[in-house]
Image: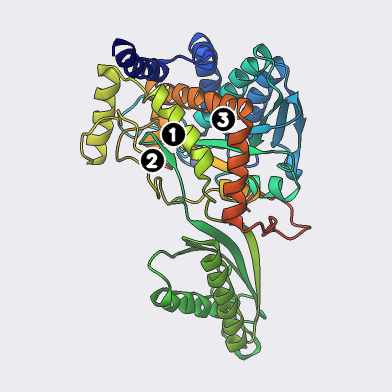
Amino acid sequence: MHGRALALVVPLVVSSLAVAEERPTDAYLDQTRDRWTTVARKIWETPEIAMQEKKSAQALAEVLQKEGFKVTWGVGGEPTAFVATAGTGAPTIAFLAEYDALPSLSQKAGTATRSAVVENGPGHGCGHNLLGTAATAAAVAANRERQSRKLAGTIQLFGTPAEEVLFGKTFMVRDGAFKSTDAVLAWHPDDQNRVANRARLAAAASEVEFFGRSAHAAAAPWAGRSALDALMLFDHAMALMREHVKPTARIHRVIQEGGVVANVIPDHTRAEYWVRDATDQSVQELLARMRKAADGAAMATETRAQVKLLFSVRDVVDNPALDAVVQKELERVGPPVYDAQDLAFARALQKELGAEPAGMAQKVSPYTAKNGNTASSDIGEVSAAVPLSELAVATRPLGTVAHHWVQTSCAAHPIGFKGMLVAAKVLAASGVDLLSDPAVVAAAKADFLKATDGKPYQSPLAADAKPQASR
Ligand SMILES: [Zn+2]
């Protein structure tokens, strides 16, 4: 009897010890915390927008090179894209680093009222300085454990530029950058701690142009054909279409060129239209309808329409097998731990925005379907080519959003740095789990094949399309 009772008790003790277990990657990241904070701060201090992230990419690549990673630049035809590789053989586990800033979101660190460092200057309002640094730290920590335990396999870190214009990774995938990759671990700064799955919207952006015939607007208007008329008619058609789309669809636009002076009939106009929806299939249908509207407007005004796809990203392909690994490690590491000052700062930001003074997320959300936000991301394209899981860790107060000066303010503040360290620990440990357990990688591949029906990845980009910063 006694022996039996022991047998019942022992596994419980072992499992509770396992929950509290500190992994070598955690210890390494704790010891090197200042190094990562310095890198993240440096990137934050020189914010660079999409396709201009020279210094930011260099800062991460330098660290990786020092750690023995081999760095290759110019992946996908993008000068600020790189891949850093360490180790050999299968499996190949990749981390994704982003580092582009957003225009006009300059904000002083740790300030609770709007106050730019540089008026209208760029800033890390999406926290990509934290994103890129945590991914790099995770790659370094996982690689150190790979070496010390002599694990088989390869670790990659992809330096992925131009996420904010939603095409950086799309070019990298089109050009086969992920061909030898077995699984991808991504993360994004958030207001919660959770595995993000399946909620991001598919999106596509198009440049719509009309070409007409110029004429004197008073002396010979009959000789002209207005490209502005065409654009107005097209925009009206799109506005009417909004009644006949699914509630999940989003259509937004800006007019970039509407003519120069009113007394000359404009012969050229240009606008940018974005369409989004829950699935890529619906986005493609909306694009087809948009092309018809453009052709119809051109026909009615005797002008010519040209619709050029700028980028297209699909909804993220979920991978439950990888998600389970990341969720397990997130629960083991636990949420960031804040002091009274951090929480007071979070509440001050919430007060400034008129939001509920709920402070910071101090728990890990359970794994459920549709966790995450609806912003689109080019990780959708990566997830359609390789098994991918995305983690979200709190780096800003509850109820606040990305693409906001609040995130810039928190991205070089202990609130952001604490979230960054948690993300690095979770990603590093998840990477080591995948290196040391081929069965999980096989399960991730099986999930991927099921979700994609075994169809090979097809790029939405034309074979000759080139990455270009918006005009
Ligand atoms: Zn972002």
Answer whether residue 177 is visible to the viewer in this image: yes
Which is more N-terminal, label 2 or label 1? 1
Q: What number is the disc on residue 367? A: 2
Say which residue label 3 marks: 132
Q: Is residue 465 left or right of residue 1?
A: right
Amino acid bearing label 1: Gln
Local crowd size for mark 1, using a 10 Å CA cut-off: few (<14), some (14–19), many (≥20): many
Q: Position of residue 116 (x, y in %)?
A: 41, 32
- For the N terminus, which image quadrant? top left
Foreground residue among 74 and 192: 192
Foreground mark, 1 or 3, reads: 1
Question: x, y (%) of residue 96?
Answer: 60, 35
Judged left or right of residue 63, residue 106 is left
- The residue that mark 1 highlights is 327
Label 3 vs 2, first from the N-terminus: 3
**For the point 64% across and 45% down, which residue is it?**
386
At label 3, the amino acid type is: Gly
